[in-house]
Amino acid sequence: MVAKCGFCGGTGTKMIVLEPYGAPRRLGAVACGKCGAVLGVADLPDAGAMLHHQAERLEGLRHHIEVLERQVGALSREIERIETHLTRHHGAP
Ligand SMILES: [Zn+2]
């Protein structure tokens, strides 16, 4: 569907970012590509909420990595233990 500008009759549109005085955050708007008249306001993704979500995901990943590190450490200690055991009983390879 093609939006038609009510001011100039133009049909091209573009997204612009509005920073209305007093608004808590920036707004996205569809504007006429010719004269720039605002045809409709669209919600911009909430950057703050997205950042918060990403930070939570990172924290979760960090926790997983810590658990993995501990498991890898335990595994290599176990391998060392087995190697020591084998060397002691069967001589160096
Ligand atoms: Zn226009």
Image (spheres, grey):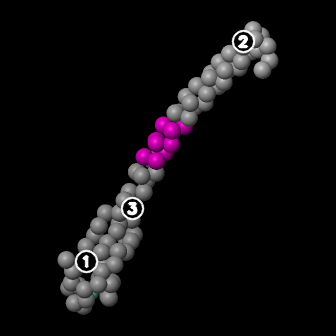
Secondary element type, mark 1: strand
Residue shown at the point (46%, 51%) measured from the top left = 51
Above or below, 69 against 33 in this view is above
* Quarter, ligand 1: bottom left
Kind of residue at badge 2:
His
Observer-side mark, 1 or 2, equals: 2
Secondary element type, mark 3: loop
Above or below, 34 against 59 in this view is below
Residue 1 visible in the snapshot: yes
Mark on residue 71? none
- Whether the magenta-drawn stretch holds residue 61 is answered as yes
- In primary-sequence order, the first of circles 3 and 1 is 3
| Total tally of numbered discs in the picture | 3
Residue under pointer 1: 39
Above or below, 52 against 46 in this view is above
Where in the figure is residue 35, as x and y percent of width and height? 32, 88
Where in the figure is residue 61, as x and y percent of width and height? 51, 38
What span is colored magenta in the figure?
Answer: 53-62
Kind of residue at badge 3:
Arg
- In primary-sequence order, the first of circles 1 and 2 is 1
Residue under pointer 2: 85
Classify 10 Å Cα crowding around label 3: few (below 14), some (14-19), many (20 and above). Answer: few
Where in the figure is residue 89, as x and y percent of width and height? 75, 8
Residue shown at the point (51%, 42%) measured from the top left = 58
Name the one closer to the observer, 47 or 68.
Answer: 68
Residue 21 visible in the snapshot: no
Q: Are marks 3 and 1 in contact (CB under 8 Å)?
A: no
Residue under pointer 3: 25
* Quadrant in which residue 28 is drawn: bottom left
Where in the figure is residue 33, as x and y percent of width and height? 32, 84
